[in-house]
Amino acid sequence: MEKPINTPVKNLILCFAAFLFFELCIMVIAHALENPPAKLLILIGAGWLMWTFVEYGIHRFLMHELIVPGKKDELFHHQNHHQNPSELLVGWPHRLLIGVLGSLLLVVAIIYQNPSFSFFTGFFIGFLFYNFLHYLLHRPIGKFLLPNVQRAHILHHTRFPNCGYSFSTVLWDWLFDTLPPADALVTEQMKKTYFNPRAPRQRQKPNLIVDCNLKKETSSTLFILIAGALLPSCVPVFSDLQSARTVGAGQVEMTPFVTINDAQTEYGANVAIGITPNFDLWARYEYVSLGDGEGTGVFGMGPKFGIVPGRIAAFLPVGNAFNPDFSDNWQFQPTILLTQPIVDDKFEATLSPKYLVYFCDSCGGYFATNLGFAWGKDLNLWAIRAEYGRIFSEGGVGQFSMGF
């Protein structure tokens, strides 16, 4: 049995509208509450709910319904996962790293109780749970933890590839009518194939929804549209002029750059040293010219971890300015780097949402986003980078950066 879906783009819009309705209702409740612990809990829950919708939307629309034949492996390698269900790209080192970071974010959220940061923490915790839950769903123990989700996921991998898109909850599958049929049985042969990576498996042909007029740039176009929606609220931060690529063990990368905005001009360089294939140590120094011969130096550094090689990375920089006037302006800026190839190894876009944490008593925190593009004959060797950023705050200053 297969459910025909003839208008995936329309379905995407309808699903997003339904999600916004639920999310806005929760945010209104959180805003009306005066009890700080209750408000914190609901905001974290709202962030978690947003992640569950994001995982559903990416799995359904970007991994299945909007994918062009023959191009599925270029973005998520999802066909490989369907052929070998127990082989997951994310390993235990990544899960443990994400777990530590999630725990730190939760501690900061409880201490500062900033609404925006609490929401971001909930979203990241959802991402953290997903990394563990997806692993458990592919293990027999999953039936004791999330029996309904695992049943849907087994059927998704075997008989109903256009059903069962969620990993954390069946809410969205239930709401959008993508649960497997209630009378569908999970047989012992299905379990053997699903749980055993070495079991012989007949190659499945998922019921992908394909429009012959769709071009291979579909996922790139969606990425740019999402980035365009976020762009009015971007900011210059330590992640300027980076992508989700890591430089590789024993390799060194340097990016000299210049940044211009209405108030100042900045000159500096990023330097990266590859520690392992998916772990870099980054440092950044820049001189900020404030005009009239005045200026200050700014230094930041932090680790960068590849989560999905070349596509998703986490960057955790800390830094400050060498100026007495900025002595209380230490910052921690946890960043997620999302890179979308537009032309393989020649042209790519990177969206880097982040949260700015200021370590001073009177300072708050802010969301920020940068959108950058890189071009080169071979991006593994060199690139020309351009980036624009602003901040999620009233009166945020925009800046434009160029680097090589």
Image: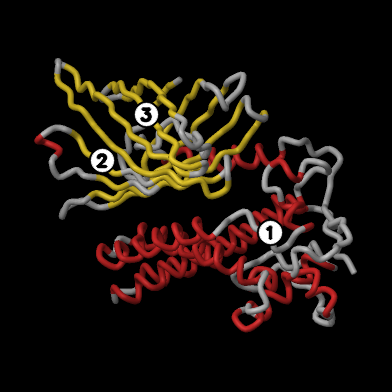
Label 2 sits on a secondary structure element that is strand
Would residue 66 be found to the left or right of residue 101 on screen?
right
Name which quarter of the figure residue 71 lies in: top right
Residue 270: mark in rendering: 3
Decide: marks 3, 2 in contact (CB < 8 A)? no
Name which quarter of the figure residue 261 lies in: top left
Query: Residue 124: x and y, percent?
Result: 46, 59
Decide: marks 2, 1 in contact (CB < 8 A)? no
Residue type at mark 2 is Gly
* 308 or 370: nearer the viewer: 308
Name which quarter of the figure residue 161 lies in: bottom right
Label 3 sits on a secondary structure element that is strand
Looking at the rendered image, the disc whose residue lies closer to the viewer, 3 or 1, is 1
Tag 1 residue: 87
Vertical placement of residue 211 versus 325, above or below: below
Vertical placement of residue 210 versus 232, above or below: below
Tag 2 residue: 319
| Residue at figure coordinates x 68%, y 43% from the top left | 75
Residue type at mark 3 is Asn
* 19 or 389: nearer the viewer: 389
How far is the residue under mark 2 from the one under mark 1? 38 Å
How far is the residue under mark 3 from the one under mark 2? 13 Å
Mark 2 is surrounded, within 10 Å at the Cα level, by few (under 14), some (14 to 19) or many (20 or more) other residues, namely some
Residue 215: mark in rendering: none
